[in-house]
Image: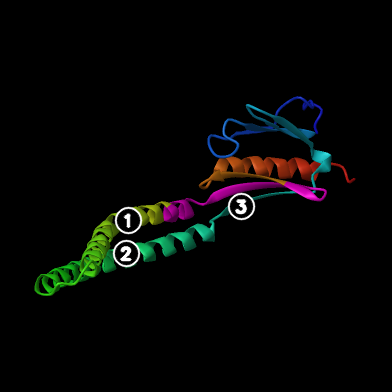
Amino acid sequence: MSSAESPDTPLAEFEFASGAHSGAQLTLYPNRIVLQGPGAMETVPLSHLASVRVAFEREPRKLNWAIALALVALVLASVSGPLQGLANAAAAEVVEHAKTNAGGGIPGVLIATFRALGGLAALMPAAAAALGACAAALAAFYWLGLTTLTLSFGATERVYAVRGRDRVLQEFAESVGRELAELPAR
């Protein structure tokens, strides 16, 4: 710390615009980092930090879910037409058979079942479209990724993440790293 820097002079700041820490602000001082948000405040002395890490990461789970949902949507969309045609044809066949033969209540149950199956098949394209939209959203979140700042100290760490590549958070982490490197050996 130079003679011009006082312990109360901020060296760098980062404000979270969205996410879990929305509205909070990280401020680096020569001897500490302060997280101040709408509902809480936390101060971490730099002398307690072991390391600082910043990285841009993509979450593979989001991509896996996007692929799985897209495949389910594709299956639903491709099965819906044939299933609807099969159910309607089966219901028509049971109606014809019931006209020629007197057969109690079984044909009525079969007709109702096949029509319900046909109605369910008619809903499958809408369900496929909804699943496709969810898959597209998950793929977009995967592509955007996260910039994550990790402060490690003792047996624990603090993780702060923001959506997308965030150069300001990377610069903040570099400032923390410089201050951490300038600390006298413990």
State if disc 2 and disc 3 touch (CB < 8 Å): no
> Where does residue 60 sit, x and y in percent of width and height?
53, 61
Q: Earlier in the sequence, mark 3 or mark 2?
A: 3
- For disc 3, the neighbor class at 10 Å (few under 14, some 14 to 19, many from 20) is some
Name the image quarter holding the N terminus.
top right
The residue wearing badge 2 is 76
Name of the residue lying farthest toward the right: 186
State yes or no: residue 34 in magenta: no
Relative depth, front residue between 65 and 48: 65
Q: Secondary structure at mark 1?
A: helix
Which quadrant holds residue 26? top right
- Residue 45: x and y, percent? 80, 36
| Image position of 34 (left or right of 104) | right
- Apparent side of residue 48 relative to residue 159 in the rendered image (left or right): right
Q: Which residue is mark 3?
A: 55
Residue toward you, 168 or 116: 116
Q: Which residues are magenta?
A: 138-157
- Dot 1: few (<14), some (14–19), or many (≥20) neighbours within 10 Å? some
Image quadrant assignment for residue 57? bottom right
